[in-house]
Structures are given as C-alpha cells and as structure tokens.
Image (cartoon, rainbow, N blue to C red):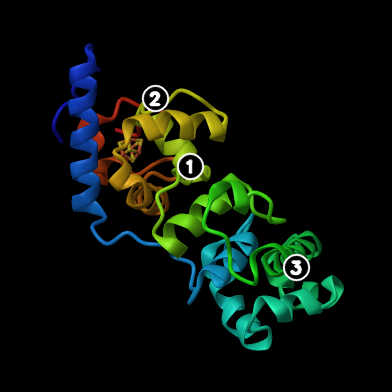
C-alpha cells in the first residue's frame, strides 16, 4: 500500500487532489447509478420517500407490487393513508410515509397536472420531498443536475475525504457544489453511496481494499 500523500497546502494542490479522487471513483464505480427500481420520476419519488430509514433492497422488494396496485399518482391520491400504510409496512415509519405519499400525489395532481415538477423550488412544495429527495428525483428521474444528494454515506465519506468539515447536510451540499464539477453532480452521489456500502462503511471501513487510501487522511482509517 503506498504511503498516504501529505495534506495539500495550496488551492491548486487541493484541486489536484479532488481531481485524483474523481478519477479513482470513476475507476472503482464506473457504472454507478440509482439503486431504487423505478420506471418514471413519479415512481422514483415514491421509492425515495419509502427509502427513508430503510434499505434500497427492502424498498425494491415492496415497490413492484405497490406500483401494480397503484399505477398512477391518481391511485395514490385516492387511497386512504391507513390502507396504503399496510402496503408499505415493511419499509418502516409506514404511517408517516403513507401520509406523505398520499399528500405528494394530491399535490402533484393539483399543482402540476399529475407530473412530478422539474425544479427544486417546486419539488420542495411536495409533501415528503425535502432537499435530498428532490435532488434524487431531479438527478436520476430527469437527469437534471440541480444539486448533490447528501445522504448519510455522502455526509460521512465527504468528511472522511476532507471535501468538507460541515455536519449539516445543506451546508455540506453548498460546499460540494463548489468542489465537484457540475457534470459530475449526479454521478458523484451515486459513486459515493456505492463506496459507502462497499468499503467506506460507517464502522471499521475496509481501507486496505480502498484505492482512495493514499489520498485519504481520515482519522477513521483502519490502515
Ligand atoms: S481509505 Fe478508508 S476511510 Fe478513506 S475513503 Fe477509503 S475506506 Fe474510506
């Protein structure tokens, strides 16, 4: 394993280091993409709301039958939340999620003619869609790079890689969009999320297997 490179001292060195991280992420996770199954921005919005405090795997086990039972936003808007809660029970927090989904469907129908809106400001008016959800839907549903998804993996790993020292997701995103080139915003989150699942896990990251290790001076490192 090569020695860890010293911390960059100048802005130019910092930039070079970020570029080296992007290059390695491309090599490690060339095909990184959204893990939530979906066929439309609406289905992605539903899946993302369901994914709060739940694994993508579990959400993917629930959504095919859910979308067969409720194929459109109109079907979600018409169901009583307590009935929908039963259909999504295994994703946890099902009462809140059911209320959000019914509310989201009603909002999308009433304000946006049944189409999930395509801007951050509009999406933030949809029940259940905070900034992270809106970035997922815009990025992976529409291919619109409006910001960077900051979930728990992105929070942890961008701090470990010294992209940011912030702890608040909104502030982390504000810093990341200055560092990560816009054409990478969508891909970057997917790559970091995959890295967080594969190697840079919360406890005892697998640093000996990590190609970013020479560029990483996190105190959590295990080598
Ligand atoms: S070296 Fe370890 S802490 Fe650093 S990015 Fe890789 S897995 Fe994460």
Image height check: is 103 above or below 39? above
State left or right for residue 56 relative to residue 182: right
The answer, for residue 6, to whether it is visible in the render is no
* Viewer-side residue, 107 vs 83: 107
* Residue depth check, mark 2 versus mark 3: number of the one nearer the observer: 3
Q: Position of residue 98 (x, y in %)?
A: 77, 67
What residue is shown at x 75% (from left), y 60% (from top)?
Answer: 93
State left or right for residue 220 relative to residue 212: right
Q: Which image quadrant shows ligand 1?
A: top left
Q: Which residue is mark 2?
A: 219
Q: Residues within 10 Å of mark 2 (few under 14, many from 20)?
A: few
Image height check: is 59 above or below 162? below
State how far apart marks 1 and 3 are (Cα).
37 Å
* Chain-order first, disc 1 or disc 2: 1
Q: Looking at the image, which residue sits at the far top?
A: 9
Q: Which residue is mark 1?
A: 202
The label on residue 106 is 3
* Viewer-side residue, 57 vs 36: 36
Element at badge 2? Answer: loop
């Amino acid at each position: 394993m090569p020695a860890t490179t010293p911390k960059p001292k100048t802005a130019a060195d910092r930039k070079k280091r970020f570029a080296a991280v992007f290059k390695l992420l491309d090599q490690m996770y060339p095909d990184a993409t959204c893990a939530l199954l979906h066929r439309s921005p609406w289905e992605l919005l539903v899946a993302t709301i369901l994914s709060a405090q739940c694994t993508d795997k579990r959400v993917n086990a629930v959504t095919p039958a859910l979308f067969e039972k409720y194929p459109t936003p109109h079907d979600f808007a018409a169901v009583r939340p307590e009935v929908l809660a039963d259909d999504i029970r295994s994703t946890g927090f099902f009462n809140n999620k059911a209320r959000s989904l019914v509310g989201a469907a009603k909002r999308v129908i009433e304000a946006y003619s049944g189409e999930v809106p395509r801007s951050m400001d509009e999406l933030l008016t949809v029940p259940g869609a905070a900034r992270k959800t809106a970035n997922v839907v815009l990025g992976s549903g529409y291919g619109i790079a409006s910001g960077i998804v900051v979930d728990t993996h992105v929070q942890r790993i961008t701090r470990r890689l010294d992209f940011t020292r912030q702890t608040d997701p909104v502030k982390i995103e504000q810093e990341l969009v200055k560092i990560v080139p816009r054409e990478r915003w969508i891909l970057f989150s997917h790559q970091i999320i995959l890295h967080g699942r594969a190697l840079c896990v919360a406890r005892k990251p697998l640093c000996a297997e990590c190609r970013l290790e020479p560029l990483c001076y996190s105190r959590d490192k295990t080598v």
